[in-house]
């Protein structure tokens, strides 16, 4: 049976690569993007045919998220992939912290994955695999923080780890598995070209882990 995935932030970087690889594996892919101006590559991929449905969804706009939910009403989502996120603003040092920007990073990286999960939880529950996966970062680890700085980004990822841990406990009675996954240091706009991993290699590794999680649920 064909599996379905909804991927936020699918217009570039890891999100685009997730869409490309799941499409190649025969999945029905709902690839969500925020800005049409940045989705040209995604639309070219959709024009090649296959099971790729391009979906307008701005995670920071509640009305946009709800409109996407109406569009996908009744559609099972085996894998809800919270990938959309933003990086740390530059120049944030002690004495020069932009707290409004910090709040925006927390909103996008922490609150919005929860909002998306909340809106689409029924779609996930009515699927076979029942997976909610949120892309986190090693920079959200307290134990691994040996370099300091990046206050906004680090705190947003540490917070989303805790949010998703609580969500996993709350959704367990509904048979939904909710996890966070660390992509590593990846060559994207956010990670930079000196990163150790290509987007293709990172997504392939994460996809393998996600597939094992899904199969464990199917065997229960």
Image: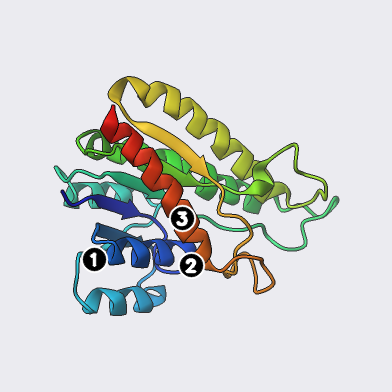
Rendered image: mark on residue 26: none
| Nearer-N-terminus badge (2/1) | 1
How many other residues sit within 10 Å of disc 3, few (<14), some (14-19) or many (≥20)?
many
Residue with the mark numbered 2: 200
Residue with the mark numbered 1: 52
| Nearer-N-terminus badge (3/2) | 3
Secondary structure at badge 2 equals helix
Rendered image: mark on residue 84: 3
Task: Identify the residue shown where x is 52% and y is 60%.
Answer: 202
Residue 154 lies, in percent from the top left, at 68, 46
How many other residues sit within 10 Å of disc 2, few (<14), some (14-19) or many (≥20)?
some
Task: Identify the residue shown where x is 49% and y is 26%.
Answer: 166
Task: Identify the residue shown where x is 33% and y is 30%.
Answer: 176
Q: Residue furthest top?
A: 173
Q: Give the vertical position of 66 relative to 124 (above or below).
A: below
Rendered image quadrant of residue 37: bottom left
């Amino acid at each position: 049976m064909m599996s379905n995935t909804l991927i936020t932030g699918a217009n570039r970087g890891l999100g685009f690569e997730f869409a490309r690889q799941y499409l190649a594996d025969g999945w029905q892919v709902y690839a969500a993007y925020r800005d049409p101006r940045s989705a040209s590559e995604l639309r070219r991929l959709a024009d090649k045919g296959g099971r790729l449905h391009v979906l307008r969804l701005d995670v920071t706009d509640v009305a946009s998220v709800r409109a996407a939910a109406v569009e996908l009403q009744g559609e099972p989502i085996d894998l809800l992939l919270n990938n959309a996120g933003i990086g740390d603003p530059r120049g944030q040092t002690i004495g020069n912290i932009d707290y409004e920007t910090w709040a925006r990073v927390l909103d996008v990286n922490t609150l919005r994955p929860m909002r998306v999960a909340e809106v689409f939880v029924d779609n996930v529950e009515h699927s076979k695999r029942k997976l909610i996966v949120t892309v986190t970062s090693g920079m959200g680890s307290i134990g691994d923080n040996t370099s300091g700085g990046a206050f906004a980004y680090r705190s947003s990822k540490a917070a989303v780890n805790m949010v998703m841990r609580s969500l996993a406990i709350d959704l367990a009675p509904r048979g939904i598995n909710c996890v966070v996954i660390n992509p590593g240091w990846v060559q994207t706009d956010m990670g930079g070209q000196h990163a150790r991993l290509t987007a293709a290699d990172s997504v392939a590794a994460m996809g393998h882990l996600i597939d094992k999680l899904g199969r464990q649920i199917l065997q229960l």
